[in-house]
Amino acid sequence: MERAVRSKRRVNFAVPIVALFLALPPRAQNVSPRIRAADDGLALTPPMGWYPWNQFGQEPQNEKLIKEMVDALISSGMKKAGYLYVGPDEGICFYRNANGELSTNLDRYPSGLRGLGDYIHARGLKYALYTDAGTRTCSKAMPGTKDHEFEDMASFAEWRADYVKIDWSNTEGQDPAKTYAKLRDAQQAAGRPIVYSLCSWGVGEPWKWAAAVGNLWRTTGDICAPAKADWDMAMKNAAANEKLYEAAGPGHWNDPDMMIAGMDGLSENQNRSFFSVWCMMAAPLIAGNDLRNMAPSNIQILTNLEAIGINQDPLGIQGHILRREGKVEIWGGKRLFDGSEALLLFNRGATPAAVQVTWSDIGLAESDRLYVRNLWTHQTSGPQGGGMSVTVAPNDVSFLRICKTNSYPVPPIIVADSYLVSFRASGPVWREAQ
């Protein structure tokens, strides 16, 4: 029999954060009339975690691999940085039995999917699984949920999943909005709060309706083939996702797909630039690299608390491109909870670029004397009036936070059931939640 692991007492921050969300002006919320997150209080900041597909594809996903990644996520410091959800992505982890119910593929997952979830929960993390809205999953190796929505959502609840990613393969003739509404009803009937990540690759314009049924939705096609980081495709996904900034907010996020930062084939500048863009877009930070063999620079990028603080800001505003100067993108429009502004200067060219930014460019008064915090060098300049000039290296970024005071608080976030982390620019302060 699969054994449940007793969880530590939870600290519920959903109510005050939901209250903050509901207090935002209509443009800041800018969502469909009904918001699922207002009911369930889930994913009020963009989900963070790890899935295996970008690096491994279908093979060699199994229980051993997932457990090794869980342990590496913890030992690398990623858990302490906020990465929470982890589990198989396809991975031939279940099949449909003669009774029409899902059963674990015990050849690959000998502890059972409930047992794998217990392993993950016992380490203070949350359990993520995968399925498909159609008749079969993408690889056709596992059954989809079509015509089995209620049975399958009950299985995920029984396995104690906390996050379910639902793909859109083999869905011929299905309507995305109706399909995902039925899956929402099935998940709610199962009685377990689960972050609901839905995918239609942008088909049916989910940013117009999906906030009522899910917590995040894919806005684009896949970011890469397994083990083949694709910089050009990543930039296409970012360009498509950036335009949809008005649809995002606490509990309802645009998802340009999982991250490629840390995968082979990218330079350190590209990894840093990618991560900065995903943070600025308030995109889900779902890592997809091999966590067991990370270069120190990749760990530093993926665990940069100041960059993560921009992504996890409770106002949940998605930044966007304010203007372009040649090969340089000037990103802004992201007010933070303390009144400061996030600013991203992204040089997509092959030579260094000098960029001039005035305070009025980012909605502040020219007369203000402001401090500028560089989120990658962790250095502060100022106060200075009018604006600033910055030189950005090729294929690199200058990720900045503009503030009226020389203080850069990062909001407290829950990174696991039993830990509260309080971030400041000088570093994290940890304490056991009571």
Image: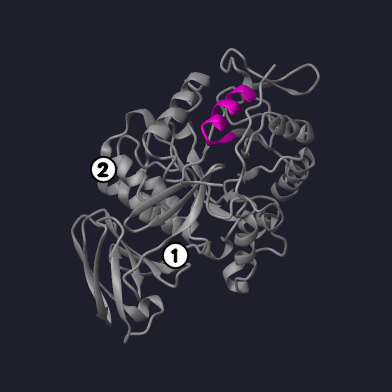
Q: Identify the amino acid type marked 2.
A: Ser
> Which of the numbered marks, if any, corresponds to residue 183?
none
Residue at position x 36%, y 65% from top?
408
Q: How many marks?
A: 2
Query: Which portion, as a residue range, is magenta?
Result: 113-128
Query: What residue is disc 2 on?
Result: 267
Instruction: For label 1, count other residues whose C-alpha is less than 10 Å away and answer few (under 14), some (14-19) or many (20+).
Output: many
Q: Where 414 falls versus 266 (above or below)?
A: below
Instruction: For label 2, count other residues whose C-alpha is less than 10 Å away and answer few (under 14), some (14-19) or many (20+).
Output: some
In this view, the residue farthest toward the top is: 107
Q: Quadrant of residue 267?
A: top left
Residue 290 in sight from this viewpoint: no
Give the quarter of the figure containing the N terminus: top right
102 left or right of 263? Answer: right
Q: Position of residue 135 (x, y in %)?
A: 70, 31
Q: Position of residue 422 (x, y in %)?
A: 44, 54
Residue at position x 34%, y 59% from top?
425
Query: What residue is disc 1 on?
Result: 320
Could you tell me what secondary structure mostly forms the magenta stretch? helix
Kindly state the secondary structure of the residue where label 2 is placed. Answer: loop
| Colour scheme of the picture | one colour
Q: Earlier in the sequence, mark 1 or mark 2?
A: 2
Q: Position of residue 12 (x, y in %)?
A: 62, 51
Residue at position x 51%, y 32% from top?
123
Q: Distance between the Cα atoms at labels 1 and 2?
A: 24 Å
Q: Where 124 falls versus 179 (above or below)?
A: above
Whether 81 is among the magenta residues is no
Q: Nearer the viewer, residue 232 or 319?
A: 319
Kindly state the secondary structure of the residue where label 1 is placed. Answer: strand
Q: Position of residue 368 (x, y in %)?
A: 33, 83
Q: Identify the amino acid type marked 1.
A: His
Q: Where 108 falls versus 422 (above or below)?
A: above
